[in-house]
Image (spheres, rainbow, N blue to C red):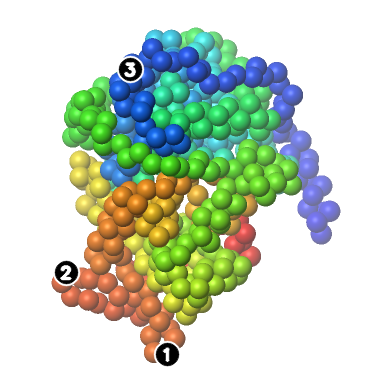
Amino acid sequence: MRKLIAIPALALLSGCTTIDFDYPRTESVVYTDTADSPLARSLANVVPGQPAGHSGFYPLSDGIDALSARLLIAQRAEHAIDLQYYLIKDDMVGRAFVRALLLAADRGVRIRLLLDDIFTSGYDTGLMALDHHPNFEVRIYNPFNRGAAGRTLGAATSLSRVNRRMHNKSFTADNQITVIGGRNIADEYFGAREDAKFDDLDVIGIGPIVRDVSKMFDTYWNHETAIPVPAFLPPLDDPETTLNALRNRLNEDFEKIRVSRYAEAVNDRLLEQVETDHSVFEWAPYSLVFDSPDKGIKGKAAEETLITTPLRESLLAAEKEILVISPYFVPRKSGIEKFSAVQASGVDITVITNSLAANNQASVHGGYAPARKPLLRSGIRLFEVRPDAEVRGTEFVDASGARATLHTKAYLVDRRYAFIGSFNFDPRSSNLNTEMGVIIDDPELANFFAARAESALPAQTWEVYLNEDGKLRWRGLEGSEVVNYDKEPKTTWGQRFMAGVYRILPIRSQL
């Protein structure tokens, strides 16, 4: 049967445009001589004198602050901006972000954009136009085949390759300042959408962490999986005209949105951050942790080059307490056993993840649901974020009826170590996607996050528990009253049915 199906499929797929992996590439590295840049001068009295091995960190939990920081950094960059993202959407935030990069390129700043290919459908012309700019180079991680057969059918010829994606998120300017964390570039991650609001977390880093991120970026940029767009996209008939048209469109869109309440708020935050007191940075030892880009090639990455190795070590070193915050939490049998063993050793574990009503991926909830009972039986506490939870930085759009979704990826160990990054506790982050993050050794920062999480639990989440009969139940506040639920709260029959379907499908390794 497989052979009969494969014959017409191969005929169809012969129309695919394949990737020229041998396309000539010029290796490039981070600019190190950037001490004369405005960013360097603004930090000149801050970084020197700090303890060796310490970097400065400032968390960005508010969506407007997170966007303002990126736009301000792009505006003040003078030499280079290096960035890698899983997705940049063609929406208000995405266009404002790309416009800021293009403006920087126009004034002579070198832009190196490394973008995953999973959400670039329809962007090919724009990517080629940006790449035409003399100061703007675009490379795509593990690109899909193009051509008459389309991306979806083209993927069938290289599924084992394109199933591996780059989930990293970093934004670094002049080798002086960096932003890393969980946010992609789209409206919902920055409080700019009326129908969806994502609770997320980034961190600004200064000091040695910046050089570490730059070194990591160079490793990805010069890797065989990072393909220049001309290697698989057709040339533009008139690239200069296309680039100018893109520039005009971005400027026109920016003029339309600059009068909105959201844009005014971003502008206000920009002005505030220009005069930021750099004493707000928390200086601490740290470890930048990330997957080797070799993970994008099946069988090539060694265990010691995977992010899971340092993450596992830091979690197993816990003596008292672990708090995991993960929007997509899908522990498999071995993961459940390890979490349960740590709990049994005397370490209190709390997990905060999305409820079915808040989750934007029903398939992921189907993968997570079977883990609840064994985790609860072992004593682990589970809290699921409500769809009506408050999200900081969404007050400037009419998002009162929008579904809240947890997107923060973090964990705390013994209220001393704080991890912030792109890694979800799921099989895809562990085995398929490349990920990154930073482990910060700072009790003050860890206690700040822990206190904020604990204060939000009663009103922003439902606690999952087992009743006397061993059945799943949920409890949470409705006003001032504690309400108990005997099924997934605030969900429809259809939502529960689909989650149940995903639960029985053999797809957990892909979640």
Q: SS for tag 1?
A: loop
Residue neighbourhood size for the residue with mark 2, other residues' Cα within 10 Å, grouped as few (<14), some (14–19), many (≥20): few
Residue neighbourhood size for the residue with mark 1, other residues' Cα within 10 Å, grouped as few (<14), some (14–19), many (≥20): few
| Residue that badge 1 annotates | 469
503 and 226: which is toward the camera: 226
The residue under the point 41% across, 37% down is 54
| Amino acid type at image mark 1 | Asp
| Mark in front: 3 vs 2 | 3
**Label 3, label 2: how many angstroms apart (C-alpha)?**
50 Å
**Label 1, label 2: how many angstroms apart (C-alpha)?**
28 Å
| Residue that badge 3 annotates | 41
In which image quadrant can residue 104 be found?
A: top left
Give the numbered dot on residue 339.
Answer: none
Q: Earlier in the sequence, mark 3 or mark 2?
A: 3
| Residue that badge 2 annotates | 479
The residue under the point 37% across, 14% down is 37
In which image quadrant can residue 106 be found?
A: top left
Relative image position of residue 196 (x, y in whole percent): 33, 49
170 and 127: which is toward the camera: 170
Residue 44 visible? The answer is yes
Mark 1 in CB contact with mark 2 (< 8 angstroms): no
